[in-house]
Image (cartoon, rainbow, N blue to C red):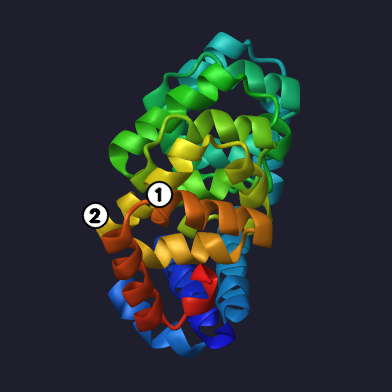
Amino acid sequence: MTEALDRLAARAEIVKLARVLGESEQRLEFLLTVPAADIRTLRDQATEALHGAHQPVLRKLVSASGIIPVPVLVTLAQKAFGPMLSARLAGLLEGERGVAIALKLPAPFLADVAAELDPRRAGHILAELPPDTVAEVSRELRRREDWITLGRFVGGVPAEIAEAGLAELNERQVLEVAFVVDDKSSLSTLVSRQPTERCAAYAHAADEYDLWHALFDLLAHLDDELRARLVAAGLDEDPELRSRAHEAAADLGVESLLA
């Protein structure tokens, strides 16, 4: 099964690499046989090149902005800097000031910034955002079906913040996001807090929207007890659904996840 899970991991990494490079996923399908860790390394290098460029100039700009009132910076962000430059600057801002600016920006603009942001550089700001702001931005990203941006943040912020974002998504959308989460070690904690009825709904969403690959990838990153709970909740009461799940698992070579 290890080889099958490796293919799922590579598939997820290709989705994310395509986003960074501005290419279609189809153009990168030749990477499916490359280890996911290597694709991740390439993506990280590309991200570092994009976000690490012009650092001296950006630091001077941040330093100069320290004397500018927050309301003026909010206007500059929207009218002059734009989402990309704002995202680059965010990683250099002091946390409290970054949060103060974010709270005055409209959710659509914050969603634009989020799509350009490297969460690793702005974690000190993201961790301090109130849940209401996170939920509002998550709703906007959900409207855009920007699962990659949502996925980047689920693994890069505290569990409470991630929960606020996931609470705005239905089960299909959670599967879409979970598939492209960077740090999947956080998934067990998040899923363990879900009510049984929501756990049951994941299998139905996978069946309805052809997201079995995402469900199986999620199961592969849960501990044994939680995986068994999710499988039982989703499949025990519906023999036909259980049959389709086993068929899909066989096609992907991950039958043991349903054992």
Percent across and percent down for residue 193 are 61, 36
Question: Which picture quadrant has residue 173?
Answer: top left
- Answer above or below: position of 63 versus 155: above
Residues 102 and 252: in front is 252
Residue 62, can we see it? yes
Using the image as rendered, state which of residue 206 and residue 137 is in the foreground. 206
Residue at left 65%, top 45%? 156
Taking the image as shown, residue 194 lies to the left or right of residue 147, namely right
Question: Where does the image place residue 227, in percent across and percent down from the top left?
Answer: 58, 58
* Crowd class of label 2 (few under 14; some 14 to 19; many from 20; radius 10 Å): few
Q: Residue placed at 68% from the left, 45% from the top?
A: 121
* Secondary structure beneath label 2: helix
Q: With respect to residue 49, does 125 lie above or below?
A: above
First in residue order: circle 2 vs circle 1: 1
- What residue sits right under mark 2 in the picture? 208
Image quadrant where one finds the N terminus? bottom right
Q: Is residue 79 visible?
A: no
Q: Provide the residue designation for mark 1.
A: 202
Residue 129 lies, in percent from the top left, at: 63, 23
Q: Is residue 158 left or right of residue 234?
A: right
Question: In front here: 165 or 246?
Answer: 246
Q: Amino acid at mark 1?
A: Tyr
Residue visible at 62% across and 77% down? 37
Q: Are marks 2 and 1 in contact (CB under 8 Å)?
A: no
